[in-house]
Amino acid sequence: MYADPVCESSLPMASPTQWPVVSLRPVEQEAVPRRAASRCSTCSLRAVCMPSDLTSMELQQLDTVVLTTRHVHRGEALFRTHDAFQSLYAVRTGSFKTVVMHRDGREQVTGFQIPGEPLGLDGVCTGTHNCEAIALEDSTVCIIPFGQFESLCRESRRMQRHLYQLMSGEIVRESSLMMLLGTMTAEQRLASFLLDLAARFRTRGYSGAQFNLKMSREEIGCFLGMKLETVSRMFSRFHRDGLVQPSGKQIRIVDAEGLARV
């Protein structure tokens, strides 16, 4: 099995409404939440991040909960480790990476989030976040106050089931990442990463054959447990084998079936 070390440069609970608001850093003007331009009931991403079978009454209730969005500039943090957990977030535009810190100060990328995907579920367990969410580009998120969302889930079995599915999805994602890092070769890791990203883009109505990678090669390596040089070498090999055609940040998957057979 081919495996590289993690890259050197980056590798009963109280009700949320009772948790104190802790300000760990000054809030810049751009970080102030703003009233959402459109409601959940009319959002094109609603079918991706919320149940598709909500009743009109449940949609109205959801609209009263998700009232604001927040703009996060590229490189800025939506939340940081040990910040008090207050809300869940749904990526509306742009993309994020989640990062945890090793004791020696190295960073480990634990995931990449694109429009329609949740952020902040890590804070439900202890009432504080255990990772950082950093914008890979200028992005916006919908803010979902967890206390109000929890109340809505008690009234709606569909929303309650959706919350369980979100949490279950995090468990599955973590298990898949452990398998990817522990049992796959470098080629298989990168191929799986590209195919998974392509499938997620297709679900949102985007092209699954050609897309831009907002993350750097180094960040991909830190997620896949590979050095930057290995990531670059794998991309070159895939290009030489006619599987993908990279052009800067843009990737075109030429042979998806071949990529799946790697």
Image (cartoon, helix red, strand yellow):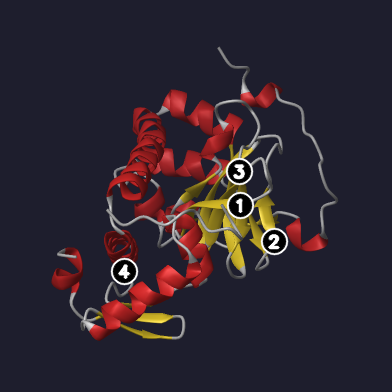
Q: State the residue at coordinates (71%, 54%).
A: 33
State the image coordinates of residue 162 (x, y, percent, origin top left).
37, 36
Of 110 and 206, which appears nearest the observer? 110
Q: Is 220 left or right of 188, judged from the image as shown?
A: right
Q: Secondary structure at mark 1?
A: strand
On the image, numbered disc 4 is attached to which residue? Answer: 205
Choose mark 3 or mark 1, whichever is in front. 1
Instruction: Confirm or deny contact between disc 3 and disc 2 (CB under 8 A).
Output: no
Q: Is 131 left or right of 51, judged from the image as shown?
A: right
How far apart, in angstroms, are the residues tagged by discs 1 and 2? 16 Å
Q: State the residue at coordinates (62%, 43%).
A: 102
Q: Amino acid at mark 1?
A: Glu
| Label ID, residue 107 | 1
Choose mark 4 or mark 3, whichever is in front. 3
How far apart, in angstroms, are the residues tagged by discs 4 and 3? 29 Å
Choose mark 1 or mark 4, whichever is in front. 1
Q: Amino acid at mark 4?
A: Gly
State the image coordinates of residue 9 (x, y, percent, origin top left).
61, 60
Give the mark nearer the N terminus: 4 vs 2. Answer: 2
Give the mark nearer the N terminus: 1 vs 2. Answer: 2
